[in-house]
Amino acid sequence: MRKLNQQVVCADGFTMSVQANATAYSIPRMSGAAAYTEVEVGFPSAREELLMKWCDEPDDPTGTVYGYVPVQVVVNVIAKHGGMVEGEVPSGIPELKSMPR
């Protein structure tokens, strides 16, 4: 059974799932890769313009997945929302932990 990453929670409350494995829309499309170049983002808590190019269902941006999102876009989304306060990202993606205030 494959392990799913815990949902990313950002400092401003924005959340999203970020997955990469043999069944996800990721490159490489395998589990346990040392690093991924594209990953699957799913079910963000709000519409995020940086992700919309990869949205499977543009009419339901919080209820769908985003396939083959470049890692740099995920990093940019996390940074835009103040960094991660909890959750997990696939290997090769900087976690960009939020700094305590």
Image: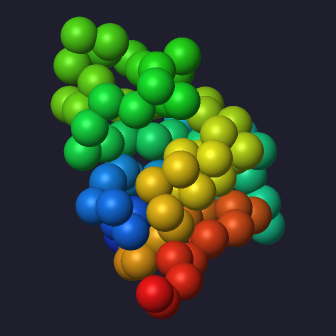
Q: Residue at x 54, y 83 (%)?
A: 99
Q: Residue at x 69, y 46 (%)?
A: 71
Q: Residue 88, relative to residue 39: is it above or below? A: below
Q: Position of residue 77 (x, y in %)?
A: 54, 46
Q: Residue 33, relative to residue 61: is it above or below? A: below
Q: Residue 90, relative to residue 75: is it above or below? A: below
Identify the image quadrant of the N terminus. bottom left
Q: Nearest the camera: 48 or 71?
A: 48
Q: Nearest the camera: 66 or 28?
A: 66
| Identity of the residue furthest to the front in this view | 101
Would residue 64 be seen by someone viewing this image from the given angle?
no
Q: Residue at x 21, y 19 (%)?
A: 60
Q: Position of residue 52 (x, y in %)?
A: 46, 20
Q: Position of residue 72 (x, y in %)?
A: 72, 44
Would residue 17 be seen by someone viewing this image from the given angle?
yes
Q: In the visual, does 36 lie left or right of 58?
A: right
Q: Residue at x 61, y 71 (%)?
A: 95
Report the label total: 0
Q: Nearest the camera: 25 or 89?
A: 89
